[in-house]
Image (cartoon, rainbow, N blue to C red):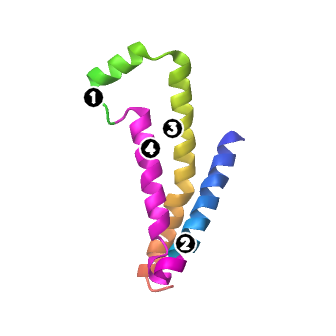
Amino acid sequence: MLIIRFIWIGLGISVVGVVVSWAFWGLDKMYLMTAIVSGILIALCAILSGTLASGDRMRANYATETREDRLNRDKFTTKCFFMAIPNILVTALFYFLTYKGVI
């Protein structure tokens, strides 16, 4: 139930992104704003999950961080990921529709 809410939030963000892109850049670049939002959300996921940290840094973070802090970080990472999914799909859809000549 919680995951569905963040998918809907991501879908709302992507609709706003498409409208803003259309208003600023026209039909040719309708995918641009959702691509930027997708990139930001995926970057947040990577940074917060610890994917970009080295092994020594991960070990130090794991040793000094409480279980509650780790769970909160993981929840935020999951929320960002599920908000990014609709943005990625809308970006891909409008990108391929634009360059296949449909729009």
The image shows residue 103 at horizontal and vertical percentages of 51, 85
Q: Earlier in the sequence, mark 1 or mark 3?
A: 1
Left-right relation of 6 to 70 = right
Q: CA distance from mark 1 to mark 3?
A: 18 Å
Q: Earlier in the sequence, mark 3 or mark 2?
A: 2
Q: Is residue 75 above or below residue 93?
A: above
Left-right relation of 74 to 36 = right
Residue 99 sits in quarter: bottom left
Q: Earlier in the sequence, mark 3 or mark 4?
A: 4
The N terminus is located in which quarter?
Answer: top right
Principal secondary structure, stretch drawn in magenta: helix
Q: The residue tagged with tag 4: helix, strand or loop?
A: helix
Q: Nearer the viewer, residue 43 or 2?
A: 43
**Three-letter amino acid code of the residue under disc 1:** Ser
- Name the mark on residue 20: 2
Q: Which residues are magenta?
A: 22-51
Which residue is located at x 53 percent, y 44 percent?
A: 80
Which residue is located at x 60 percent, y 55 percent?
A: 10
Can you identify the residue that label 1 sits on?
54
Q: Earlier in the sequence, mark 2 or mark 1?
A: 2
Q: CA distance from mark 4 to mark 1?
A: 17 Å
Q: The residue tagged with tag 1: helix, strand or loop?
A: loop
Can you identify the residue that label 3 sits on?
77
The image shows residue 20 at horizontal and vertical percentages of 55, 72
Q: Are marks 3 and 4 in contact (CB under 8 Å)?
A: yes
Q: CA distance from mark 2 to mark 4?
A: 22 Å
Left-right relation of 61 to 14 = left
Please tell me whether residue 28 belongs to the stretch shown in magenta. Answer: yes
Q: CA distance from mark 3 to mark 4?
A: 7 Å
Can you identify the residue that label 4 sits on?
44
